Amino acid sequence: MAQLSDIEIAQNATPEDITVIAERAHIAPEYLEQYGRAKAKIDPALLRDSTRERGKLILVTAINPTPAGEGKTTTTIGLADGLRRIGKDVSVALREPSLGPVFGVKGGAAGGGYAQVIPMEDINLHFTGDFHAIGAANNLLAAMLDNHIHQGNALGIDPRSITWKRCVDMNDRQLRSVVDGLGGRMNGVPREDGFDITVASEVMAVLCLSTSLSDLRERLGRIIVGYSYSGEPVTASDLHAQGAMTALLRDAIKPNLVQTLEGTPAFVHGGPFANIAHGCNSVMATELSLRLSDYTVTEAGFGADLGAEKFLDIKCRAASLVPDAVVIVATVRALKLHGGLDRSALVEENIEALGRGIPNLLRHVSNIKNVYGLPCVVAINRFPTDTDAEIDYIISRCRELGVNTKLSTVWADGGAGGEELAREVVRLCESEQGGFEYSYGLELGIADKVRTVVRRIYGGEDIDITPAASKQIARLEELGFGGLPVCIAKTQYSFSDDPKKLGAPEDFRITVKNVRVSAGAGFIVVLTGDIMTMPGLPKSPAAERIDINENGHIVGLF
């Protein structure tokens, strides 16, 4: 019998009515805004009205991703289902997928196998329209900025200093660098411009970090779009854009409620990538889940050097969160790839290659346990080709750091394959006392914050700052932004800024190329290496295989 694809598994499932899921999540009907039978938005007033104390918070992160796959989202969903199977009141808080990767190469963000959130095709495509609203708000600000210049430029904006880009939710390298405003005076003022992918927009970060509609409006107003001829920052508030932008985001700020294949409530909201943004779902979705459940399982994007670092150093600061336990996901296949093994040889037992690759996992474990002071467990997402000897080797190496390892088979077995992991997570939450600390203090200068992350989290030697970036840092500190946390944009494939340096490289240096402030989000964006905020499509994008049949069912979506 042929193995079912993710979308076939999802389409064969019969979702419960969203009203049933809402009741399971302790959401009263007056706070529920239905989008059909299987989706809903939650009125943020529930956060104001709730008197329930926060439950336990579990963060799921992973090793540096590889083409072999790790299954972080799948593990997150399967763990939540596993917790529910052992009798816990639980919900899961996830990010929304971006269309660019869905039609490109990465895939969606709804899990896989028998550990998915549904309706999977809706979630991976338009869902409830949040990303479209974010793109519209972003581009409204861009239009108002260029219109202001065209209409006389009363604020004295220097077109050469404009930092605000338009965005589109698609991988489109053609739009990275453009010249617009051509064709005569009536078509605007010609200037160099460019597009970001929507998930890289500061509007996305603002929405994900906002705690209310009024907080959203205030944050949008603080967005810096460029600088005047005198060098002063020009904000969205100066352009009187924040009100209209907030109006566009009125519904987008409301967390979305869906369900796992096993009926566990799932809040899917917000979607930044941790290699170019802060990599977490929205504060409001996480807070809702914490207020409504005894256990909340959430994830942060890519490896722990990106997503977990930003979750802990940015999101936890902003929302006063402290995880009760951390799960670090790895696979034998991925660790062997980190050990230099070719993809064609991953199915064969190779302890030597595993030994070369496991330092990647161990560095992430050490960071969570020793830098951040949080209890953690390693989850091995097991494949049929993994041998007992390989599993035992990982268990023994993690035990040396005082961390347990649990096997996960949630892709094949759903929540049943996550029960062992769930019991260990409960044990950590109930009996292990963490001493949470941030990896750096806000009193450090911008460069020293980046240097500290590079040394303490990445394992690097130091940073090299280009002359342009050095001037940017000096100017931002002069403007009073030196006390903000840093959001480092870096390749997800390596601790370094070189995607080819796998495993746990040492004695490397990180090149800081560009530094800018996201004043609305409340952090400094630091671009390193060759990272870019507008990806491209691969030679054979997934879009070539996605279609719809005569019955209206989407096919080819994973």
Image (tube, rainbow, N blue to C red):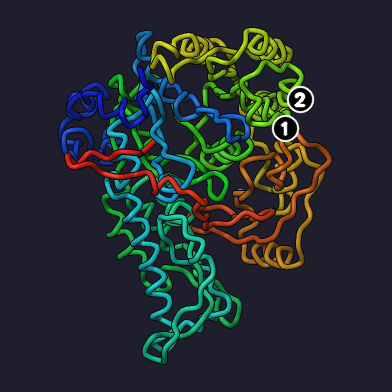
- According to the picture, the residue beneath numbered tag 2 turns out to be 356
Q: Determine the residue positioned at 57% across, 16% down.
A: 385
* Place of residue 287 in the rendered image (x, y in percent of width and height, measured from the top left): 39, 34
- According to the picture, the residue beneath numbered tag 1 turns out to be 503
Circle 1 crowding by C-alpha within 10 Å: few under 14, some 14–19, many from 20: many
Q: Determine the residue positioned at 73% across, 16% down.
A: 351
Q: Quadrant of residue 167?
A: bottom left
Judged left or right of residue 147, residue 373 is right
Judged left or right of residue 4, residue 461 is right
Q: Determine the residue positioned at 54% across, 77% down.
A: 192
Q: Eyeballing the image, is 518 above or below 487? A: below
* Secondary structure state at the residue bearing disc 2: helix
Residue type for callout 2? Arg
Labels 2 and 1 touching (C-beta < 8 A):
yes
Q: Quadrant of residue 137?
A: bottom left
Residue type for callout 1? Gly
Q: Quadrant of residue 11?
A: top left
Q: Is residue 260 visible?
A: yes
Q: Nearer the viewer, residue 217 or 552?
A: 552
Judged left or right of residue 122, residue 467 is right
